[in-house]
Image (tube, rainbow, N blue to C red):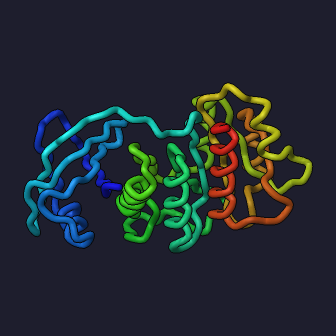
């Protein structure tokens, strides 16, 4: 199987410039002149190309074949998730991108352990470029030809204001009285846009849950155990995308 590379804009030219990052990756993989690669730009376009030149600064490839390909899930899933500490967010993003999540929205909640501080290089908003690179790499590895969107962090209340954009938006809850996620999804077989909200360590506050209910959001549970943020987000994505891919 040919190695896959993301290119920001393939355009309609017969020759494609890959750039320094891709050129470095080609050398690391041991690819050289004449090697065939698959290129995609996140729009659904996929190109088979042959490496024509390679240097430390860039690489160029000749387009052999173009095709519009869809490997996306039948439901457009947005995961709105509190930001966990350290590298755990990277783990969440990588797995969600591989699974087929359309977008991840980092949530700033009352109990968030990661908050924005203006001027700090370690805040979630300053990590957006890194998060995008993780999503790109996961698409290259997993065979997706679209790149999962990673939005800037938003306050919980602001995301609720967008809840009407989805056919169904729900909050994950450990409450055993909440319906299991598959059972709730079974009540909405034809939905196209789904949003699942995952709270921080300690969960959403009572005030946040009341506000979510006032916006028409339901609740659903995954397991009877308490899950870490990234575990809950990945599990919810896997359950939802598997359910609608049957």
* Nearer to the camera, 129 or 6: 6
Residue 111 appears anywhere in the view: no
Q: Looking at the rendering, which quadrant does residue 186 occupy?
A: top right
Tell whether 182 sits left or right of 94: right
Above or below residue 217? Residue 91 is below
Of 206 and 101, the residue lying toward us: 101
Q: Position of residue 173 (x, y in %)?
A: 79, 53
Q: Percent position (x, y) of residue 151?
A: 45, 49
* Vertical placement of residue 101 versus 89, above or below: above
* Quadrant of the image containing the C terminus: top right
The quadrant holding residue 182 is top right
Q: Residue at x 19, y 36 (%)?
A: 11
**Residue ID at (20%, 47%):** 49
- Please indicate whether residue 29 sits to the left or right of residue 205 in the image: left
Q: Is residue 194 shown to the viewer in this render?
A: yes
Picture coordinates of residue 152 (x, y %)? 45, 51
Q: Quadrant of residue 185?
A: top right
Total numbered badges shown on the rendered structure = 0
Q: What residue is at 74 percent from the left and 33 percent from the top?
A: 216
| Residue 201 rendering spot, x and y as whole percentages | 70, 66
Side of 228 relative to 71 (left or right)? right
Return the residue nearer the eye: 130 or 119. 130
Relative to residue 162, is residue 186 drawn left or right?
right
Could you tell me which residue is drawn at 41 percent across and 61 percent down?
A: 134
- Residue extending farthest to the top is 190
Near-viewer residue (21 or 166): 21
């Amino acid at each position: 199987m040919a190695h896959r590379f993301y290119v920001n804009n393939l355009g309609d030219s017969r020759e494609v410039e890959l750039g320094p990052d891709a050129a470095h990756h080609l050398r690391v993989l041991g690819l050289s002149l004449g090697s065939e690669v698959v290129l995609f730009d996140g729009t659904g376009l996929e190109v088979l190309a042959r490496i024509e030149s390679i240097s430390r600064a860039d690489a160029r490839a000749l387009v052999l074949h173009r095709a519009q390909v869809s490997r996306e899930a039948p439901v457009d899933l947005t995961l709105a998730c509190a930001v966990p500490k350290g590298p755990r967010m990277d783990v969440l993003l990588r797995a969600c991108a591989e699974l087929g999540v359309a977008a991840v929205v980092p949530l700033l909640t009352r109990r968030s352990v990661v908050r924005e501080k203006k001027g700090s290089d370690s805040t979630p908003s300053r990590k957006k470029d890194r998060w995008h690179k993780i999503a790109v790499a996961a698409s290259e590895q997993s065979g997706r030809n679209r790149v999962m969107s990673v939005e800037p962090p938003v306050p919980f209340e602001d995301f609720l204001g967008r809840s009407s954009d989805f056919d169904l938006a729900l909050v994950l809850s450990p409450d055993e009285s909440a319906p299991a996620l598959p059972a709730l999804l079974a009540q909405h077989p034809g939905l196209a846009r789904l949003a699942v909200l995952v709270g921080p360590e300690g969960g959403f506050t009572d005030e946040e849950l009341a506000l979510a209910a006032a916006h028409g959001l339901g609740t659903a549970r995954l397991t009877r155990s308490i899950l870490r943020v990234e575990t809950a987000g990945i599990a919810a994505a896997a359950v939802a995308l598997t359910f609608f891919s049957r």
